[in-house]
Amino acid sequence: MIKGRNSQIDGVRCVCNYLIVLFHAKTIMQFAKGDSFEADFWRIICSGWSITVLAALFFISGYLMENGFSSAAYWGKIKRRMSRLALPYVTWNFLFMLVYLILSLFSAEYSSRVEAQGLNTISGCFSRVFCLFDAPLDGPLRFMRTLLLFAIVFPIWHWLIE
């Protein structure tokens, strides 16, 4: 056990992360026959309990944010969150958009997707990454953005409650 770490919490986070990855693997259903054991297995994996798993991850993240929180360590925590959350979030969004934009040059289907997503303008591209009211182009990235926002806003809530 690493000093200052709780192996039970780490274990729950690990299991939740794996369950979320399995949930996002629901595209496998297109290859499973409707009445097979495999299809039944994936229906169970892709059912509504995944929302509970996501809520558990938010709860654990909130608990860990409060655990050992101090005002003096705030900026260090924000720097770590920026490198762990903001940088991968922004990088992945722009790479995802770049792939869509390149594919739109060769495919009418992708061209219509680019237009529907508002990616045909620079402001549309930036809006999909930085606007809090627009969903990220790759939906599961909402989790990363939400964690980053919680890390930034948490001290304000903490000071108001105190």
Image (tube, helix red, strand yellow):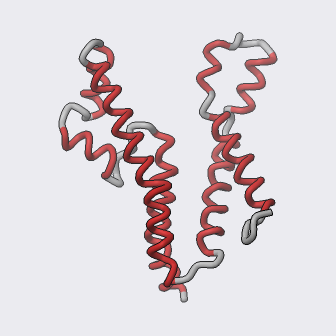
Q: How many dots with numbers?
A: 0
Q: Give the residue drawn at x 75%, y 70%.
A: 3
The answer to whether 66 is drawn above or below residue 19 in the figure is below
Frontmost residue, 101 versus 112:
101
Q: Is residue 102 above or below residue 1?
A: above
Left or right, residue 155 beside residue 59? left
Q: Position of residue 96 (x, y in %)?
A: 38, 33
Above-or-below relation of 91 to 41: below
Image height of 155 relative to 147, above or below: below
Residue 136: give x, y in percent of width and height: 39, 43
Q: Residue at x 33, y 26 (%)?
A: 100
Q: Quadrant of the N terminus?
A: bottom right
Answer with left or right where residue 136 lies relative to residue 85.
left
- Whole-percent x, y for residue 160 in the image: 48, 85
- Which quarter of the figure has residue 78? bottom left
Percent from the top left, x then y, of residue 120?
21, 31
Depth check: 28 or 116 in front?
A: 28
Q: Is residue 63 left or right of residue 119?
A: right
Tell me what residue is drawn at x 27 percent, y 12 percent: 106
Q: Residue at x 75, y 31 (%)?
A: 44
Residue extending furthest toward the front = 2
Q: Is residue 153 left or right of residue 126?
A: right
Image quadrant occupied by the C terminus:
bottom right
